[in-house]
Amino acid sequence: MENKKTLFSAVQPSGILTLGNYVGAISNWKRLIEEYDCIYALADLHTLTVKQVPAELRAHSYELAALYISCGIDPEKCILFCQSHVHEHAELTWILNTMTYPGELQRMTQFKDKSKSHSDNVNMGLMDYPVLMASDILLYNAHLVPVGADQKQHLELTRDLAIRFNSRYSDTFVVPEPYIAKTGAKIMSLQDPEKKMSKSDANVNAFISMNDDRDTIIKKFKRAVTDSGNEIRADESKPGITNLLTIYCCVTGKELCDAEKEFDGVGYGNFKIAVGEAVADLIEPVRCEKDRILSDKSYLDKVFADGALRAEHIARKTLSKVYRKVGLVERKF
């Protein structure tokens, strides 16, 4: 049987995810497990580039793992682990740092943006973030990496570092490619449909959290921004209605043209309630299952331990090869 390609993805456990995260990424991961050898990491080391409350970070890590599993990501069919549990990530980062130029990191758009938004804590980890990300990917010889627009520069650096190392020391790393989802509509803010939905939005009515209960979800949709007129159709001039139609299609699997026909002649108020109910129907069972899994910390600790051992087995082989090629003395004890 032909070997599957390896797909690597990591998400920071910096807070509960939104409907946008679910539609854009997690909902596809169950299917990806059948197509690829999937490695999913909780990028907890990455979260430390901005100030964290330690107890909250630990809680978020457990919660994110429980959410993954409740969404159908079976830890027996993939590798699910905490980045900090596999020390090879930090070790390979040091080797790659010796091949990364300051100008490359200073040019990163995300570094510039976060330096402005976290001006009281512009640390070296914030600048070095893309090198740690490169290590995450290259350790596992990942062929494919799902990336959003904000991570494209980082993946390009990963590719550059892999090529640079291979050129200097002979072929070692797989040069990864971006994974482009076949479907992946962008979910926008419910209060400002010109902006992407974000869990960091100061207005809690702007996003749907995967922790929201049914009543909260429907209330948020009732308050969602619409547009002038009364026609329910997708159009550039109607960003609010277009966003709600997009959300409805994403959670029901219906085509946009069919959704427009379904709501032909329906008032905005009833339309927003219908979208809210469809979203609640999707999220409610996931939220309940996540809470059930989260109540069993010993199970999640076992998932983390098993995942880390499996990840480390791969990572150790890669790092040993790297150490040998750069000329470090092999450890015999």
Image: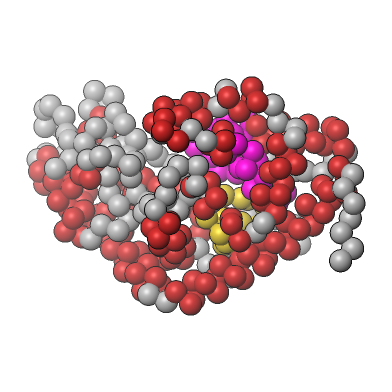
Residue 49 image position (x, y, % from top left): 50, 42
User: Is 143 left or right of 153, judged from the image as shown?
Assistant: right
Residue at 45% from the left image edge and 53% from the top image edge: 13
User: Furthest-front residue in view?
Assistant: 120
> Is residue 233 left or right of 85 when viewed as pictured?
left
Q: Can residue 220 be seen in this view?
A: yes
Q: In this view, does 10 lie above or below 307?
A: above
Quadrant housing residue 118: top left
Identify the image's colour scheme: rainbow, by chain, secondary structure or one colour: secondary structure
Q: Is residue 174 above or below residue 241?
A: below
Does residue 22 appear in the picture of this structure? no
Q: Which residue is drawn at 58% across and 55% down?
A: 83
Q: Does residue 326 appear to the left or right of 191 in the view shown?
A: right
Q: How many numbered dots are placed on residues in this image? A: 0
Looking at the rendering, in which quadrant would you find the C terminus?
Answer: bottom right
Q: Is residue 140 magenta?
A: yes
| Left or right: 87, with 324 as reference point | left
Say if the magenta span includes residue 176. Answer: no
Instruction: Name the magenta segment's main secondary structure.
Output: helix
85 and 196: which one is in front? Answer: 85
Residue 8 drawn at (x, y percent): 61, 50
Q: In which quarter of the image is residue 84?
A: bottom right
Query: Horizontal and vertical percent for residue 68?
Result: 46, 61
What residue is shown at x 55% (from left), y 27% (from top)? 108
* Range covered by the magenta-colored residues: 128-156
Determine the residue positioned at 29% across, 39% down: 201
Percent position of residue 184, x then y: 44, 42
In which quadrant of the rendered image does the N terminus lie? bottom right
Between 167 and 233, the one lying in front of the other is 167
